[in-house]
Amino acid sequence: MAVKNADTTKPLVTVEEIVKSHWAEYGRNYYRRYDYEGLETEAADKVFAQIESQFSVFEGEAEGNTSVNFTYNDPVDGSVSKNQGYIFKYADGSRFVFRKSGTGSSGATIRVYLEKYSKETDKDVAEALKEISDRALLLCQLQELTGRKEPTVIT
């Protein structure tokens, strides 16, 4: 901001203008997260069993599709956390990710992350991610297995 607005004789350059200029040059990463909070743990476990059953189906849909149950390796203390979620990635780098947390007495939360890079920078986020979102929700059958029609939170 300071560099872009160093010349005080010119109109101020806004954050929005800087971001749009960046997107015009480099493209845009669209991102959205769906949180399904307060699910019964048993229902959430069924969703994750369904997800696990879809690895080979997703990979067989198109060349370059991959899926993995990912592990986090902490670079500071060296600890390893297995079963951190599932990544379903398309050949172009677009992906959807499922993570489950809070499986204690108050229920579980399932988070669905949607990500896509595009040179088209002026789309609505929901529109840009619709195909990925539809595929992720079809794959996990969250509505059918939990009765939840929509996320608790969308970010």
Image (cartoon, rainbow, N blue to C red):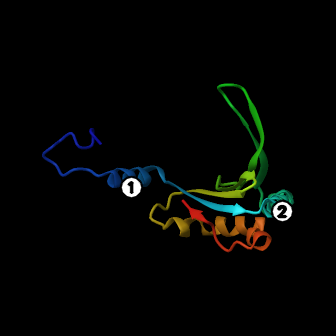
Write the residue at 77% across / 65% down.
140
Identify residue type, mark 2.
Answer: Lys
Left or right: where does residue 32 sit relative to residue 88? left
Write the residue at 80% across / 70% down.
145
Label 2 vs label 1, nearer the camera = 2
Q: Secondary structure at mark 2?
A: helix
Write the residue at 69% across / 57% down.
109
Residue 46 in the image: state x and y as whole percent. Answer: 84, 62
Q: Disc 1 marks which residue?
A: 20
Residue 73 - label: none
Q: Nearer the viewer, residue 114 or 144?
A: 144
Q: Earlier in the sequence, mark 2 or mark 1?
A: 1
Write the residue at 78% across / 52% down.
67
Look at the image and tell me in which quarter the C terminus lies: bottom right
Identify residue type, mark 1.
Answer: Lys
Q: Secondary structure at mark 1?
A: helix
Q: Is residue 60 above or below residue 80?
A: below
Look at the image and tell me in which quarter the N terminus lies: top left
Q: Disc 2 marks which residue?
A: 46
